[in-house]
Image: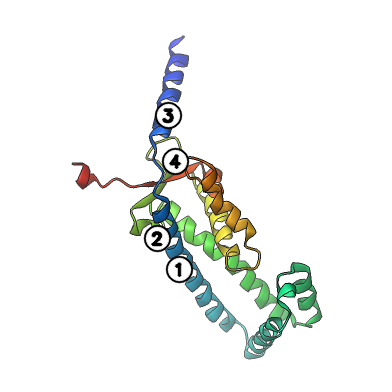
Amino acid sequence: MNESPTRTLDDEEEETNQTASLEPAPLLKRTIAFAMDFILIILILQLMAHFLPNFWDKHTQDEFKSLLQQATLLAQENQMDSEEMSRFIDQSGLSPETYEMLMAMVVWACFLPILYFFIGERFFFGKSLGKATFGLRTVRMDGTDLSPSPFRQFFRAAGKGLSALTLITPFLLPGLMNFLFCFLNRQRRCLHDMIGGTITIQEINKKEVS
């Protein structure tokens, strides 16, 4: 009857040793890998912005283009003010169809970066295209070779995807805080790693080991 607690303590000690042995991937490689992913996300968003308006009629497309042109004429400080931009949109007298297109753009712009990172986490063993290029991989902090649960993978992807999205908007501070957090801990974990219970490591080449 006393064996179970003993095994539990041994398991916890083994997990602690495994976690301690995880070496974070080189920061330079992670930065370049993220830069590659970031460029791909921008390309995906540009494709979305190019093809999505085709689901609406020409009048709606023209009205949307006119709205964008008017927005570029606003003072830079007003473009960075969310309340001012909301007021500008409300005063533009958009048709319901154009407003629908605008909301669809916003939703897809938020969703696509999350989807990009989630696909890598879930279906490619913790590797985005950038990570796979440099042999990097996201693994669980407990030192096992298992992937995090889909729930954790999604929220990790959400944190990373939305942080990446903010870097191409005037509101880049949350994204910067997420990624710069890795400088505050020895395991170089960003906030999205904390959410997912993960760490990014350099994958070992089995051929080299053998």
Between the C-alphas of marks 1 and 2, the distance is 9 Å
Inspect the image, locate mark 3, and give the three-letter code of the amino acid beneath it: Glu
Amino acid type, callout 2 = Gly
Q: What is the CA distance from the residue labelled 3 to the residue labelled 4?
A: 11 Å
Q: Secondary structure at mark 2?
A: helix
Disc 1 vs disc 2: Cβ atoms closer than 8 Å?
yes
Residue 124 in sight in this render? yes
Q: Quadrant of the C terminus?
A: top left
Disc 3 element? helix
- Compare residues 51 and 15 and report the one nearer the observer: 15
Give the distance between the C-alpha atoms of the residues marked 1 and 4, in whole angstroms. Answer: 25 Å
Residue 89 percent coordinates (x, y): 76, 77
Q: Amino acid at mark 1?
A: Leu
- Residue reaching furthest to the left: 210
Q: Are marks 2 and 3 in contact (CB under 8 Å)?
A: no
Query: Which of the numbered marks, if any, corresponds to residue 15?
Result: 3
Upstream in the sequence, badge 1 or badge 4?
Answer: 1
Mark 2 surroundings within 10 Å by alpha-carbon count, few (fewer than 14), some (14 through 19), many (20 or more): many
Report which residue position mark 1 lands on.
40
From what the image shows, is residue 93 above or below residue 162?
A: below
Disc 2 target residue: 130
According to the picture, the residue beneath numbered tag 4 turns out to be: 140
Q: Is residue 155 visible?
A: no
Residue under the point 58% across and 64% down: 167
Seen from the viewer's position, the closer of residues 33 and 15 is: 33
Mark 3 Cα-neighbour bin, 10 Å: few <14, some 14–19, many ≥20: some
Q: Nearer the viewer, residue 85 or 115?
A: 85
N-terminal of the two: label 1 or label 3? 3
